[in-house]
Image (cartoon, rainbow, N blue to C red):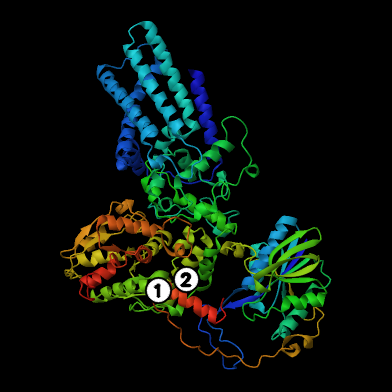
Amino acid sequence: MDIYVCIKRVADTSEVDIEIDRTGLALTEDDFSYDINEWDNFAVEAALQLKEEHGGKVTALTVGIEDDEEVLRRALAMGCDEALHLSDPCFEGSDAWGIAQILSAALKGKPLDLLLFGTVSADEGAGQTGGFVAGLLDLPMVSLATSLKVNGSIATVSHEVEGGLERVRELDLPAVVTVQTGINEPRYVSIRGIRKVSGIEIPVSGVGDLGLDPNQVGASGARVKLEELFLPPQGQSAQMLEGSDDEIIDKLLDLLQENGGL
Amino acid sequence: MAAALGALTLILNRRLALLRAAAAEPRTGDWGARLKRLLVIGFGQSRQPRYLVAGLVHVVLFAGFMLLSLRSMSLIAEPFWPGISNIGEPYTFIRHMAAALVLVGCAIAAWRRVVVRPARYHDRHATVSHTKEAVAILSLISFLMIADAAFDFGGSEGVRKVAFWAHNSALLFFLCLLPYGKHFHVITALPNVFFSSLKLSGVVKPPSYSESDFDALETVGVSKLEDFTWKQLLDVYSCVDCGRCSDHCPAYASKSPLSPRMLNIKTRDAAFEHYPIKGEITPPEKRADLVGEVITPDELWSCTTCGACQEACPVTIEYLDRIVDMRRFLVDDGNLPATLQKPMAALEKRGNPYGKMARKRGDTGVRVLKEGDACDTLFFTDSCAAFDPRVQETAIAFGEILAQAGVDAGTLGKDEVDSGHEARRFGEEGLFLTLREQNLEAMDKREFTQIVTTDPHALNALKNDYELEQPVLHHSQYLAKLLSEGKLPLQPLGDNRRYTFHDPCYLGRHNNEYAAPRDVLNAIPGIETVEMERSRNRSFCCGAGSLNLFHETECERRMGELRLDMVAESGADVVVTACPFCLSNLEDAAKTTGRENEIEIIDLAELVQRSLGKTKQPEKE
């Protein structure tokens, strides 16, 4: 089974005072630390578990700058067989459509059975890339997968739908699945594990290797443009409920009911 | 008879096969110290009386065995050298007394096994009871005593002859039976004591003794029997199944999945099954996974590495190195609980388990050393005192005491990262090595003559894991030193509350410091102190440090809460401790058990600061 997982390196913004830089279009990155997008980590684990069950090969790929190679190395340490780094100065500023073009150009013609994504990325949070790539490659797709099994040439996927319900679908392979957190328990990657793969050469493909027109991707090809970035205005101060525990619980329930929280 | 001795040799040789296949571990040298341990803990049975009745019965049985062994050997030699068993009148008298005492001892032991049935003999997690085995062996010993007496007092030659053969066959049968179960300790316990570790128990063994480059190791940790070192397996062979370890284990007391005794028993059962006395050795791939199936990850993650188990073991079985080695395998295999993956990643990315930015470290009031700066005493705060607001108060208190005593102190500031103590003990050796390197680099760029820390875990790491030139002191030791130099003019606290000291595991048991904090405490004029029953080397872990804060093991009642019950029992109003995690855990437990207004938890530095008149004593409730 040939499985491809698309992953992304994102900033960890917890514990950081978010500031907008002078351009007004980006965050001050000085304090950020970076790691694999949480959803993508579950996608890699899902791919590895399928490989362990059915055999085959798992390839991780990412679009990004030189530093982003870090998440590919981490994926190799987790157990992926190969990695592919799609990197080119003209990819800078791509929107989800541009990223999808780059990914599908890299994947076109590959012997692919299953293509996995994390459902969304922690930074942009749009959840578009998986869908775009499925469209560009003309593959069936399910998003928000909470379980994923493969039997022969059919994948059985349960996924979240509105109202807290789950739906189970069968897909003919090859197919695209975007993975929700909690689908599995991703394995830990030790420092030693990362060091063991530090010598592996990860191939890099640029715009020319992929046969892409530079104007299709990057800032120039982006269909979505960022206009302004601002911090949400501080909301009303918190409301403190007073009284005995039971009274507080009753008040809280009333409030939740009134405001549509239940 | 020769056949029986031959059989015993063959049996022992089969048992040794696993030890020969095991990993290396140097346990030679320092023979004087080893001999001393053998005489005191082995022959002297010094750890037995912790449990008075059972301990004394064992001392009697052991002494009886020693005294009677001469007789037993001479009886075996009797057919070859007639008359050799007649050693002389004084010995005859002594051995008659010994035999009588052993008989009484057997009776008491059997009565305890069958009637009293102390809880510690019946492990919550055990699937098989060893009562039958114990009673069978006790009966066999009693039979030996009676046969021996019949040989002496039998009267007719016929009775003597029957008694003689009965005694010798029973003895040889007994010897050949030993390596099949828990009574193997009769043979292995003394060597086990002799080869026990002479290091402080805070020292963790390296991942391998034969390869010092961690990155060059092909596999890490213990996943199968042969990955243990020979000494770790000798430990397992020597387990008497007495349950003292689990009886002292705070994880067992809180009803978590861990019972240290079962780690021994399950490993030994696997060893006996896969290295049988008769038949082929089972190849590893045909066995149940030792780590993962036989011993579950939950058991291993439940351990706080407090060391109470090994301190309680009468035959010096070591547990922590084995637990850490098995964790090393789990970590290398990617099998780390999700709750621990976050703090580990935070340690890697930001140098502290909270994932906070270095520049957000709390200010302790102590001068921050820039690169190239020098001071006398380097104050290493470690993560908790840097980022936890409550614990930071203790570091500030200690900083103020240092200032008042005129100490030239400094910190590494934001160049300090976590000591890595828990990362190492949770099996993430690579992360520990990275953190150590960062701290050593920061230290290298500054000059100082000694280090002090308010965290016993940091003390243990810096002193035992870092290999520094400068001495490392815990703040209780530093305060005791300042006191002896007359630099701490302590004043009465002006209250009539009772104080007790809670020994942090990594200060007391693991680094042998029980006196310094008590010296400081008792130097406060007019202070009234009480000791808890579980104090000093029997101290009961609060629930443990650093990463344990992030990983809640399933349990019935938290260790901290159990500890506060013991505080209440002692009649103390104030618990003084000297560890940030003890402080946090016990304060939490005071809240969850509704004792917030009855019992105060305080760090030694805070108490000293109070006694120096720096802060006001809180109003008595």
- Locate residue A139, reporting x and y percent: 81, 72
Sequence-first disc among 2 and 1: 2
- Locate residue B351, reporting x and y percent: 48, 71
For badge 1, the amino acid type reads Ala
- Locate residue B81, reporting x and y percent: 39, 13
Q: Which chain is mark 1 on?
A: B
Q: Which residue is under mark 2?
A: B352
- Locate residue A231, reporting x and y percent: 55, 89
Q: Are marks 2 and 1 in contact (CB under 8 Å)?
A: yes
Q: Is residue B199 above or below residue B377?
A: above
Q: Nearer the viewer, residue A107 or B66?
A: A107
Q: Is residue A120 visible?
A: yes
Residue that appears at 46% across and 78% down: A251
Q: Nearer the viewer, residue B220 or B372?
A: B220
Q: Which residue is under mark 1?
A: B386
Separation (CA) of disc 2 from disc 1: 9 Å
Q: Which chain is mark 2 on?
A: B
Q: Nearer the viewer, residue A195 or A253?
A: A253
Q: Please rate how many residues cluster around mark 2, counting C-alpha atoms within 10 Å: few if below 14, some from 14 to 19, many from 20.
A: many
Residues indicated by labels 2 and 1 sit on the same polypeptide chain: yes
Residue that appears at 64% across and 40% down: B283
Quadrant (top left/top right/bottom left/bottom right) for the C terminus of chain B: bottom left
For badge 2, the amino acid type reads Asn
